[in-house]
Image (cartoon, rainbow, N blue to C red):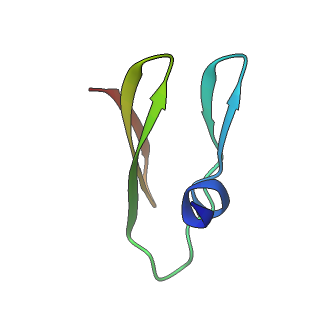
Amino acid sequence: MAAVLGFGGLTIKDNKIEINPRLPEKWQKLAFHVMLQDELYQITITKEETMICKK
């Protein structure tokens, strides 16, 4: 959970996912799932992009 909230920068505001990533220099990727309002989302963060996909 610390990696998701800290390095992933995950916050939920007004029932919306907000991401402000801060990946450590040596990390290439961080991926995790979030359940929000009975919907499952996959979040993938790389140095180049952040993707939020509804599953």
Name which residue lies at 54% across and 79% down: 25
Quarter of the image containing the C terminus?
Answer: top left
Please say if 1 is above or below 43. below
Percent of width and height locating residue 44: 38, 48
Percent of width and height locating residue 49: 43, 47
Find the residue positioned furthest to the right. 13
Name which residue lies at 55% across and 56% down: 4
Q: Nearer the viewer, residue 29 or 11?
A: 11
Q: Is residue 25 left or right of residue 40?
A: right
Percent of width and height locating residue 2: 62, 65
The count of marks equals: 0
Find the residue positioned furthest to the left. 55
Percent of width and height locating residue 53: 33, 29
Q: Is residue 48 left or right of residue 11?
A: left
Find the residue positioned furthest to the bottom. 26
Q: Nearer the viewer, residue 45 or 36?
A: 36
Name which residue lies at 39% across and 20% down: 39
Quarter of the image containing the N terminus?
Answer: bottom right
